[in-house]
Amino acid sequence: MTIDEKIITNVVQEVIQQIMNNNNNNDLPKTINDKITGIYDSVDDAVDNAVEAQKQLIDMTLADREKIISAIRQAALDNNEMLSKMAVEESKLGRYEDKIKENILCVTKTPGTEDIQPIAKTGDNGLMLLEYAPVGVIGALTPVTNPTGTFIHNGISMIAAGNAVVFNPHPSAKNTSAKMVEILHDAIVEAGGPPGIISAIRIPSLETAGQIINHPKINMLVATGGKPVVKAVLSSGKKAIGAGAGNPPALVDETAHIRNAAECIINGASINNNIFCTSEKEVIVVDEVADSLIKFMQETGKAYLLSSEEAERITELVITKENKINTSFIGRNVQVILKEIGIKLDDKYRLAIFEAPKDHPLVWKEQMMPIMPIVRVKDIAEGIRFGVEVEQGNRHTAIMHSTNVDNLTAFARAVQTTIFVKNGPAYSGIGLGGEGHTAFTIAGPTGEGLTSARSFTRQRRCTLVEGFRII
Ligand code: NAD
């Protein structure tokens, strides 16, 4: 090469580099201090960056993805105390020590890339390979009840599947959600991941939710929340997962180990002050063992039995004149709620229980507070019928305490929930003290069940029509 040629080559390379830099700069939306933090004021900016980031992610190896996921897990653990405290303080829902458990559960039991192992089939006609491919950019709408767990679970699962995610957090937990996303984003970038692969809208609203739902560059929607948001994503015309509300009944028959049932129900229903969508929301018990169940619940030392007069006053407090749940008591400690009617409870209590008629509003409404109605039924047949009715077709979660396999099978078949827990607290169905992976997006309405990386993929088949078998 002559000197002239060298100079020309250098100049050309410099110009190409400059063009690339300019292009990159133009492509990148302005964020605070021009730095990509994962937190955006505008949906368009978040989505544009997510599109770029997702392209980069799919050019990386699966080992790189796992490295990113390990970084997410570590960052969530390192900041668990701070995030749990922030979540309880901002949302005023749940209990600090339970948020800590929730986050550890999401960190340790959300599957990574192992969940998208391909399936291969060989035969006389060659080879078929089925792979779980990314969908692209996902818009995720998240609930106020889990502003940490949902992000850890969704973040790991969606990135493990090769996607980028733009979150529209619940407005009442926007600061915790932003902090959570910022922490995960920094950890991802530090681990060599693409900036913008995970992001959130700084000031989320129904308007920004609508922009995400209708954004042409968002390929898939995931709604974790109540019925309206599930309906909104399912009406979008896009691939969507709906993880909606539940009203899980806990049915106890006369063959159950009653002391164990009492302990499990108190623990399950009081975790995070009952805001888990999976938590027991009403107890249905066969008359023969109802008194023992209530006695054993009291003997746990964690359940306060309301008299019928106290139960009436509590009902007037937590149910509005319009027959709705009074949201100011959702997720609060039992002490805070009972104080309103002049009952001062020791800190050891986690739940108030009371005997309720079948038509009591707290039996039918998803109360998400530590006030638990108990309904007597004459036998298991009536219990199963009533359990199915109060679950209301949510197909979410049901719990049963029994040692009679026929009864267990009959209720499981009749209620058809996504999660059916036998002889344990409801939370064992999401992997806390139970087998299986965890999920904080449990898709009853759309049927994916406890979501994981595979839920956020599209299937692709590759066929090789040749003799491929080696046996
Ligand atoms: P929510 O439905 O009020 O809010 C969830 C999210 O949807 C928020 O980001 C909110 O801003 C958005 N949203 C609400 N209505 C919308 C609409 N019409 N259009 C667009 N976006 C909308 O729910 P929440 O009060 O935050 O959370 C509690 C509910 O979520 C309970 O019903 C609980 O059972 C359910 N939940 C379900 C799961 C699950 O995995 N199935 C997990 C957690 C919570």
Image: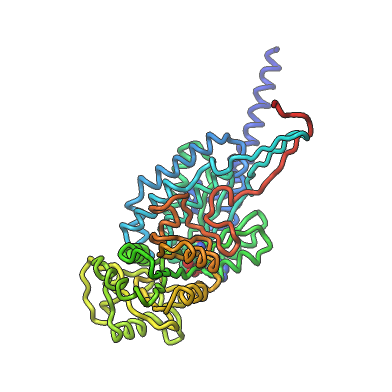
x, y percentage for residue 445? 58, 64
Which residue occupies 44% across, 40% down?
71
Q: Can residue 94 be seen from the camera position used here?
A: no
Q: Residue furthest top?
A: 2
In the image, is residue 163 above or below residue 16? below
x, y percentage for residue 461? 71, 42
x, y percentage for residue 471? 69, 26
x, y percentage for residue 175? 41, 59
In this picture the colour scheme is: rainbow
Q: Closest to the observer: 341 or 350?
A: 350
Q: Closest to the observer: 404 or 131?
A: 404
Horizontal relation, residue 116 to residue 73: left or right: right
In the image, is residue 185 above or below residue 450? above
| Total numbered labels | 0
Horizontal relation, residue 351 to residue 394: left or right: left
Q: Closest to the observer: 205 or 275?
A: 275
Horizontal relation, residue 182 to residue 197: left or right: left
Which quadrant is the N terminus positioned in? top right
Which residue occupies 28% across, 79% down?
306
Q: Can residue 282 be seen from the camera position used here?
A: yes
Which residue occupies 44% across, 65% down?
399
Could you say which quadrant of the image residue 122 lies in?
top right
Q: Closest to the observer: 27 or 130?
A: 130
Could you say which quadrant of the image residue 318 lies in?
bottom left
Could you say which quadrant of the image residue 335 lies in?
bottom left
